[in-house]
Amino acid sequence: MKVKKSLIVVNSFKEESKSLGNEIQAYLQSLGLQADIFLFNGYSEQYPFYGYDFVITMGGDGTVLFAARGCAPLGIPIFPINFGSFGFIASVQRDEWKRELDDFFAGKAVVDERSLLQADLIRGQNRRLSATGMNDIVICGKTAGHMITFNVLYDKVPLGEIKSDGIIVSTATGSTAYSASAGGPIIDPDLDSMVLTLMNAFSLSSRPLVLSPDGELEIEILPSRMSDVVISVDGQIPVDLHVGDVIRVCQHEKKAKLIGCTKEKFYNALRSKLNWSGGPQHA
């Protein structure tokens, strides 16, 4: 791949990220490439990616999610260096960045495509919010321990009236995040799917659902004792919801491109980060 211009997204809360970001910038410039730095503080409504050939992220999975939301519509690949705790998405290790970056320049790196979700908030006849996320769409109360009532349909087929503390709709990528902590299944990132996971459902028979990404979920907020309901996308600033609001969730038409995120790294992260060892180890 012929590249000339890169953007390095540096998580401003991580001092090591700033230091290595400067080192990588100098390395890219020594190769004759333009390399700019963007400081990311965990939230930004600005997506400064237009005109770049590739983006390097220096942070945890949250920094990659930010870049993915901005880069996917533009078809820009992301090189995610891990400075976070888990690194399910940011899977390039700090001591391997140069070798893996050189592989990318030589056309030898794996470029993995990951699905995103599109969420539209319909209030009355108007669309009040449209947002994209690579991990999940979360609908819940502002405070914990309050039951919310939802009406849920999938491709216009009723799934029922649901009572729970909230609903998580995740991608396969996001299945290792909030959905997993709520009891949802872990999905191989290569398996295109939407995962519907309920948070503390009223019915013990309620179970997570793995759905085809070709369909559309429709979630309506019904009257309940809990009035302060919000929606958040990839953990960004929540937006208030009202009774009667309908949230439509489907797969986004574009996919995020992640450099160096191999299947081997994903399963290594399961073993090392979640202690998924499969049983006692024998000497």
Image: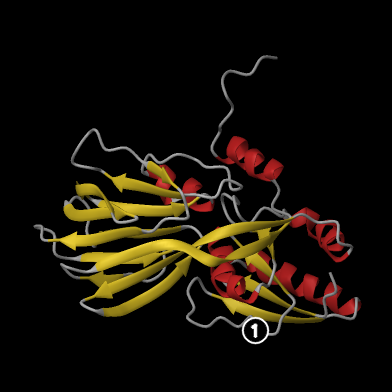
> Which x, y percent locates residue 74?
63, 76
Residue found at x 48% / y 47%: 175
> From this viewpoint, is residue 13 visible?
no
> Which amino acid type corresponds to the residue marked 1 in the rendered image?
Tyr
Residue found at x 57% / y 46%: 191
- For the N terminus, the quadrant is bottom right
User: As drawn, is 179 to the left or to the right of 48?
Assistant: left
**Above or below — where is 248 with respect to 7?**
above
**Above or below — where is 22 with respect to 176?**
below
Q: How many labels does the image show?
A: 1
User: As drawn, is 225 to the left or to the right of 258?
Assistant: left
Residue found at x 42% / y 72%: 131
> Which x, y percent locates residue 157?
28, 51
Describe the element under mark 1 as helix, strand or loop: loop
**171 or 124, which is in the foreground?**
124
> From this viewpoint, is residue 206 visible?
yes
Circle 1 residue: 50
**258 or 15, which is in the foreground?**
258
**175 or 8, which is in the foreground?**
175
Residue found at x 22% / y 61%: 220
**Above or below — where is 6 with respect to 261?**
below
> Which x, y percent locates residue 186?
50, 40
Disc 1: CA contacts within 10 A as few (<14), some (14-19) or many (>=20): few
User: As drawn, is 244 to the left or to the right of 54?
Assistant: left
> Which x, y percent locates residue 274?
54, 38
